[in-house]
Image (cartoon, rainbow, N blue to C red):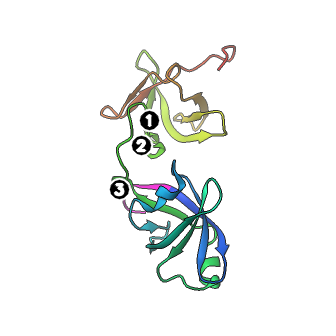
Amino acid sequence: MKQAAVLVGVVTGAHGVQGEVKVKSFTAEPRSIGAYGPLRTEDGQQYEIADMRPARADEVILHFSGVDTRNAAEALKGQRLYVARAALPEAAPGEYYHTDLIGLRADTPDGQAIGHISAVLNYGAGDILEIKDANGSKELVPFTDRHVPVVDFVAGRVVVDVPSTEEEF
C-alpha cells in the first residue's frame, strides 16, 4: 500500500448467502473497525461497510457495499483489512500503535545502535519487540518500561536495556 496503513482485521470467511463476511477485528473494541472509514486490502481494493453486527468476542459480521453473494464473500477470505494511519486517533500516553514502532532505531542506554525494531509480537503475555541488527540477527525484548525506558518518535529511536540471559523477564 502506498500510504501508511494499519492492519485492523482479517476476513476469516463468508457468513450466510447474502455476501456477508466474518472478520477477526484487531481493534480494542471489535465494532470500532467501522469507525475509521473505508477498509482497504493489500492490493488497494476499497470496501465500504454497509452493515455490521457483533459475532464472537473479537469478531464482527460485515456486509460490504457491492459484495452481495456468498461467492463474492468467499473470494475475500484471508484478505487483510487496513485503514490509513491518519484515520486513527492519537494513542494515549504510554500506548503505541505497532506500526509506529516498527522501523525505529534501537539504542543501548549509552547510545550505541543495536538495530531496528522489525516487528512487535504478542503471544498473550505482553508485547515483545523484535530487534534486527545489521547482520540480520534478531533479539527479542519485552516491551516494558524496565526494558524499553525511552520511546522517542522525534529522534526515531527507542532505548533498549537488553536483559541478560540470567535475568528474569
- Please name the residue shown 35% across and 43% down the image: 90
Residue 26 % position (x, y) = 55, 52
- What amino acid is at disc 2? Asp
Examine the rendered structure and indicate whether residue 134 appears above or below residue 71. Answer: above
Mark 1 lies on residue: 95
- What amino acid is at disc 3? Ala
Residue 19 % position (x, y) = 59, 80
Q: Residues within 10 Å of mark 2 (few under 14, many from 20)?
A: few
Asked if residue 127 lies in the magenta stretch, the reply is no
Asked if residue 3 lies in the magenta stretch, the reply is yes
Q: Residues within 10 Å of mark 1 (few under 14, many from 20)?
A: few
Mark 1–mark 2 Cα distance, whole angstroms, equals 11 Å
Instruction: Specify the label residue 87 is tagged with.
Output: 3
Between 60 and 41, the residue placed more toward the observer is 60
| Residue 20 shows in the view | yes
Could you say whether the residue bearing mark 1 is in a helix, strand or loop? loop
